[in-house]
Amino acid sequence: MKMNFLDCSPEVSAALAQKKAIVALESTIIAHGMPYPKNVETAMRVEAMVRKHGAIPATCAIIDGRLKAGLSAAELELFGQQGAGIAKVSRRDFPLLLARRQHGATTVAATMIIAQMAGIRVFATGGIGGVHRGAPQTFDISADLQELAHTSVAVVTAGAKSILDLPLTLEYLETQGVPVLGYQTNEFPAFYTRQSGLPVDARLDSPAEIAEVLTAKWALGLQGGVVVANPIPAAHSLPPEQIEAVIAAAIAEAEAAGVKGKALTPFLLARIEQMTEGNSLLSNIELVLNNAQLAAEIAVAMAG
Ligand code: PSU
Ligand code: MN
């Protein structure tokens, strides 16, 4: 028998029992993706956005070795304040944190695991991890992609940052059988920009159509996730040349400093933010809010 490691908040438990729309949210973006106190403020705004569009937010994390779906305001504050002092958790880290009863900030992969366990099908994030530039030598491929291959949760994302090799990321998702759906776009968005020059598998123009694709996939018994690629609102996108130059500089610094493994993504995010003097942070916040709205609309369509 599987032991119970999961605590759903009272609100999330009630929503599950009533088959209400729920949207999972990650906690790495809070602890490792944005500076305090903007991170906590954003986490609250994202939860409010999910509610505004008719769903219940379930921010996921590990607290004292327990898996959590649904955090209190005090818990969000704790993750925001402690930031990088809290371990960044992917699939491989669960056993150790549970055994040691520690806290963990969940990445896309780890949040998908908790969401699936709780029975939550839709998840909003900022950007997914992917195949890093230079991966043919470094083998640095985010565990997010493997999780999408196996865990049945739809991830609403503004595409992926071009700190990654986007063509290889899409190849990997294709190999692993993960549909990449564009919401009102034919192109896979590149996080800060709406365009990457790379096609999505299909363009879908309404949350209801996306919900139908998800329902069909899982009704068919095809396990695994779906990428719902939602471009950043045009008003908040950054000039592609500027962001490309900044990303190249940040990657060069990481190489020079020997930053690798799970530290690489947070390092690059922080350097990009410093180099754009906070501009990238504003865009980052807006695209997460935009993803929270779409995820709520999809969850409502699936519940209906
Ligand atoms: N990409 C972003 N912002 C983020 C992350 C990725 O643009 O905050 C975080 C997410 O939590 C994602 C994780 O799941 O980084 C991927 O880390 P890695 O590349 O180490 O797998
Ligand atoms: Mn990695």
Image: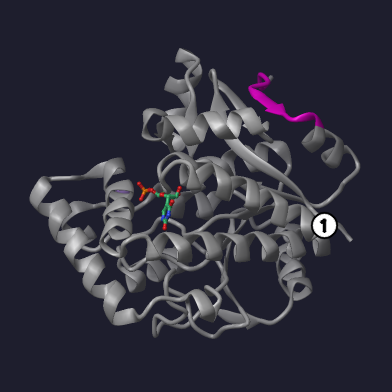
- Quarter of the picture holding the C terminus: bottom right
Q: Quadrant of residue 160?
A: bottom left
Callout 1 amino acid: Gly
Callout 1 secondary element? loop
For the point 50% across and 45% down, the residue is 39
Q: Specify whether residue 9 is painted magenta.
A: yes
106 shown above or below 25:
above
Position of residue 282 measured from the top left corner of the image (x, y, whole percent): 46, 63
The quadrant holding residue 276 is: bottom left
Query: Where is residue 131 shown, x and y percent of the image?
Result: 33, 60
The stretch drawn in magenta includes residue 111: no
Local crowd at mark 1 within 10 Å, few (<14), some, or many (≥20)? some
Expressed as whole percent of the image width and height from the top left, the position of residue 60 reads: 60, 38
What range of the chain is rendered magenta? 2-10
Which residue is outermost to the left? Answer: 256
> What residue lies at 39% left-to-right and 70% top-to-bottom?
171
Task: Classify residue 211 as left or right of residue 100.
Answer: right
| Residue linked to disc 1 | 54
- Image quarter in which the N terminus is found: top right
Q: Position of residue 88 (x, y in %)?
A: 41, 36
The vertical placement of 235 against 303, above or below, is below
Identity of the residue drawn at 28% across and 77% down: 242
Q: Nearer the viewer, residue 281 or 4?
A: 281
Residue visible at 66% across and 22% down in the picture: 2
